[in-house]
Image (cartoon, coloured by chain):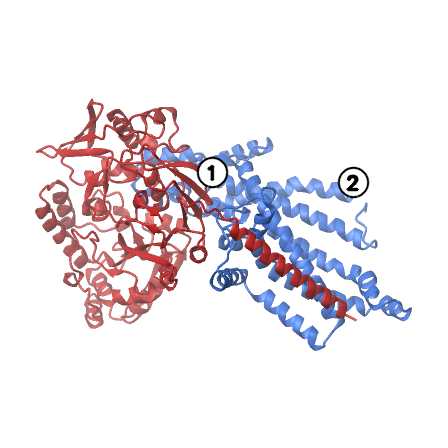
Amino acid sequence: MNYLTRRLVTFPLVMLGVSILVFVSIRLVPGDAITAMLGTEAGLLTPDQRAALEAYFGIDQGWLVQYGRWLAGALQGDLGISVTYGKPVLDVILERFPLTLELALLSMAIALLVGLPAGVFAATRNERSSDLVVRILAMIGQSTPNFVVGLLIIFVLSVGFGVLPVMGTFTPFFENPLQNLGQMILPAITLGFAFAASVTRISRSAMLDVLSEDYVRTARSKGVPALGVIWRHALPNALIPVVTLSGVEFGYLLGGAVIVEQIFALPGLGRMVLDAILQRDYALVQGSVLFIALNFMIVNLIVDLTYALLDPRIRLGDR
Amino acid sequence: MGLPFFQTGAARRIASGVALAAMLGAATLTAPVAAATLRMAWSQDATGLDPHKQTAFSSIRLLELIYEPLVRLDSDLTIIPALAQSWEFAEDGKTLTFKLDPDAKFQNGEKVTSADVKASFERLMAEETGAAARANFLSIASIDTPDETTAVFNLSQPDVPILTAMTSINAAVVPASEIASGGIGTKAIGSGPFKLESWEPNAKEVLSANKDWAGGTVSVDGIDISVLPDETAILAALRTKQVDFALINDPLVATLVPNEASLTLDRTPVLNYHVLQLNPSRSPMTELGVRQAISCAIDRQDVLDTALLGEGKVAGPLTMPAYATDPAELFCYERDVEKAKQLLADAGHAEGFSATVIAATGEPPTAAAEAQVIQSQLAEIGIKLDIKMMELNVYIDTWLKGDFDMAVALNGGRADPYSMYNRYWTKDGNLQKVANYIDDTLDDLMQKGRVETDPAKRKEIFAAFEKHLAEMSPWVWLYTSYIYTAQQQNVDGFVATPTGSLFGLSAVTIK
């Protein structure tokens, strides 16, 4: 079997493991859909009323039966119905996913556009004051929580300039690209801030390693222009750790950025999962975590395949 | 050699800054400016559309705009007509007759008739519906419908508080046809001032004015509600005039609203009460002296000032103005640390003891701060509190099992003292196992208050009840807080009620 097939075969197994883990852990947490809906008023229910509601929420059977029922549906592509939204789980997820994907792509673009040049620049100015400035900025970027960045942006814009992107009602990209980007750019900057800082740090250190290699010295002594040395000879070899980092970060972002979505009132996956957990919408939690896990595995696979492209010495073929 | 990078980087940053400003400008300009639609924001969205089943404040606030009960409460907590134009208790207090508004119509065009009233209450009472509010209507034996606009409730025993219970949206009248088709909860077809055009859970609601509303004329075209989960973002949206009207829960955010000249903050005292629940079934809270010591050791005003920035009012168990006693007359409402120490010593705990207090994260937003202030106050008499913060659902589960030493709680208030407390302080109260305290005097006074029809006598009964409850200190009542609404200057005519209802939006105008 080649590498790709081998990896693809493990997908269903990992998914099965994830589904069991999620299924059990959400049910181990005290409280259920009934207390989530009724709060303390749930204490007023008679046993018969409680039984009726349990049947309504599909939590009247034992765990094994519930899981079996869910798995049978999932195998046929039916992830169940979300009790909060009154719609199939997959529909709810797919409605929220484009926003999350767009946000992840935008923040990654910001991170790479800012972080990579900054890292390379710092490496070429190693231990000089400009390197120090970049390193300090990166340190600040990495250690500032994104809710601080997000709230600061909102505060400065609304108090200082009296402007703010439209919040609450989200405009999809293909409906009105300009308004969509107006809504997405601030959250993307918020997320991209720390991400860019990580990219800066990792690309700086990778670049420093590469720049001390013999072949770089050879290229320089052959009279290759400085920019050519950096871009053509050094950078491609310094990219592997950057790709690893970006892949992992991107995978996380596809799971939704709970805090940033919360602050900017964006209806993305992260907030949806959080609300689903708080409202004990079991089917939606189960379905969305599975979806996020699948995304993460796909991104990781793409990262592994990229290694081989970047460095021909890495072979992913038969063993 | 790195210089060119820097230059390109800087140029790119400047270019992206310009693009950002352009996009934000465009986004601000393209914001909807339909003058007659009220743009509203709140942080917590409704969790469902079934008026009989939903009990969360966030759901009730939405459903009160769409559905109507037979009667409702005004801002003074007086019972006023809603779907019913008039009502009457029979001499013996066992029959309650309603005359319906003959013009009332559901949003599907059907008339509201006594058959809908009967069908709605029968649905509410049926155990398979799973409506928690059923507990308030157990005295209903049968409902007669002598004609289209008359509904007669036959009660198994005199039940004065039932009329107040009927003001809740949990007793809403829904179309009998929708009950038959199973549409309740998936669609929202009421008879109220607004129609629900669309609902995207945890994101937004679009409401339009119901032109056929029998209760009056709605002057706005509709309401667009946005869910902005972070209340500081709501404040920012108000500042930038994206939102005309907003509901705010967190006193720390609300107190910032008046800093903005263009905004008005309204605060209304509510019936809900903040309380430190003790568990009298757990040692040493089993002893009266220990519970009283805790009550005497707590400086209620200080907790209020420190945790809620003073945004509230110290209160006894009864929070409705018609029944509330002056807190100064209640047991140990003036802090007395010496008395507390003495009471504790007399109970054999001179050296104090350790206990755990539970609180819910973010519900209310000040819960953690309240627990910390109480912790430091009780430390002065040697009681060491361990604070356990829990996610709301976990807290509710633990609370319902009565599985705590002490609990910091924000409990719902009612306009009637019986409906508010029979669940805790009567022997067969549904939440007796949460209160864990049985007291013959309290039970007796509750039963008397239930059947007494003379308002002056009822007031006496409940005053005695409140005094005794504060003295026995199964819980330590602290204070009531406010609900806040913030609005732009162009919004006019909103009247809040102590129940937290947003029904007043039906009278709002936009200039």
Q: Is residue B11 visible?
A: yes
Name the residue nearer the viewer: B31 or B359.
B31
- Is residue A195 something that shows in the picture? no
Chain letter for mark 2, please: A
Q: Position of residue A124 (x, y in %)?
A: 76, 71
**Residue drawn at point x = 80 percent, y = 68 percent:** A211
Chain B color in figure: red
Element type at mark 1: loop
State the residue position of label 1. A85
Which residue in the rendered view is the most extreme toward the front?
B511
Residue at image position (53%, 37%) is A89
Q: Which residue is mark 2?
A: A1
Chain A shade: blue
- Of residue B10 and residue B463, the one placed in the foreground of this image is B10
- Give the vertical position of B95 relative to B295 (above or below): above
Q: Quadrant of the N terminus of chain A?
A: top right
- Give the crowd class for mark 2: few <14, some 14-19, many >=20 residues within 10 Å: few
In this picture, is B295 found above or below A288? below
